[in-house]
Amino acid sequence: MSGTGLSQARGRFRAVAAEKLADTRVQGAIDTATGRFYTAREKAWAELEDVEELRERARDIRTRTIDDLERHLADFTRTLESRGGHVHRCTTPEEARDVVVGICRRANAKLAVKSKSMASEEIKLNDALAEIGVKAVEGDLGEYIIQLAGEHPKHIIAPALEKTAGEVAELFSAVEGRKVSSDLVELQRTARLQLRNVFLTADVGITGANFGVAETGSICLVTNEGNGRMATSLPRVHIALMGMERVVPTLAELAVLLKLLARSATGQRLSSYTTLVTGPRRAGETDGPEELHVVILDNGRSQLLGGRYREMLNCIRCGACLNVCPVYRKTGGGAYGPVYSGPMGAVLVPLLVGLERAPDHPHASSLCGACTAACPVKIPLHELLLELRRDLVAEGVAPLRERLAFWAWSAAWSRPWAYRVSTRAARLGQRFGGLVGPGRTWAAGRELPSLVSRRFRDR
């Protein structure tokens, strides 16, 4: 299974997490941003008459759609192409990159403006475009900041949440060649000036797609800035990258999902811009692209259909699970890798690239279940993480020492006499210095309760 921009090396998570934990500035920035999103979501959900009923409806829509995914994708393709659009089904990131590169070459493109797209990060599109001489500029403010810094997004909704106003001012100053104030109004004005000409002169606009509507052949873009609409209406060519699972059957069902998406992501009733794009510009219309291409990406998603992890395809990318996760709120997004982070990333990345390439991700959770409670479509994220931990052992991906330790623990606690011996030994061990070896490392950051001298079973 090809991973491209998703793959991770063993131990990277712990190394990056340790670095972020030691950075008090980053800790404060993450706490502030995620805390604000968390509070806003709670208030927005409370406004709904019956949020649990709405979540059940949304979960049912996503489940039914994924269960009959090929039919809905075929309907979407047929409807969009009848309206003059082009659909490209791509199995691997390499295929998707080749399609986009081919479209840009035929358009003689030199400049591409992008609206925020996690799928483009997933396939490392910017690097591929640079190789053929196409400059790709991020039009989303957060993504633009991250691009100037040479980094990857740290959050699905707020890519630059770890950056301070002072750091952004330094990045903008480097572009301007003059000192830019860290005043927020000045930063916004500077960003507009820097990006305006990009929107006006770009040959190609590249966006993601929050949803594709099979009934109308439309793609739905949900943004809080005008970059999405400018990227889809000003350039001659519009390319939309969409994960194959993002299709929804009808506009009525889209409305249910939109009712939860913005509320779960930012606490808004509706995002500032919710845009439906249906085909390229028609005769008599004054704006819109001459060509519309929708690139539908598989990249391992089809292998999840019908299996234990198929519910992960229900994800609507709201980011709510990140904002409540105690692990993400301490480590930040960088530890998870360049694309997906938080609980949804901890599940999705190993499924797309293989456990052996992301072995730390299933352990990036306290299993408290907050992510499952926050998910608008009720994906049991903490249960899926437990399943992945079982797979780590079953597939021999976990280190031999770890597998042996858990085998010994399981063997000891599956027999009454062995349980009594092991707990008695634990009490003695605690009296003479506590855990040893890997256990001492595990306990270093935790407060362990004292074991009583007389067990309940003894009584």
Image (cartoon, grey):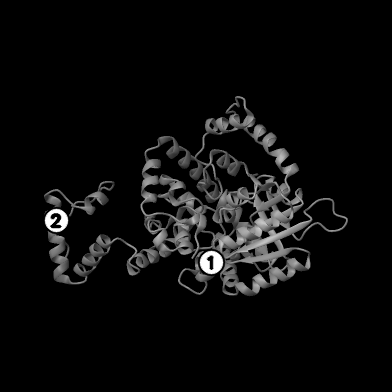
Q: Which amino acid does label 1 sit on?
A: Arg
User: Vertical placement of 71 versus 261: above or below?
Assistant: below
Q: Which residue carries the number 1 mark?
A: 301
Q: Which residue carries the number 2 mark?
A: 427
> Front-most of 150 and 446?
150
> Relative to 447, is 342 on the left or the right?
right
User: In the rendered view of the protein, which quadrant contains the C terminus?
Assistant: bottom left
Label 1 and label 2: CA atoms lie apart by: 48 Å
Q: Nearer the viewer, mark 1 or mark 2?
A: 1
Residue 69 at what x, y percent from top left? 60, 72
Residue farthest along the right direction in this orientation: 284
Q: What element carries label 2?
A: helix
> Relative to 104, is 299 on the left or the right?
left
Residue farthest along the front direction in this orientation: 132
Q: Which amino acid does label 2 sit on?
A: Arg
> Front-most of 237 and 25?
237
Residue at 49%, 45% (x, y): give it.
Answer: 34
Residue 31 at what x, y percent from top left? 46, 41
**Crowd band around label 2 with a 10 angstrom C-alpha radius: few (<14), some (14–19), many (20+):** some
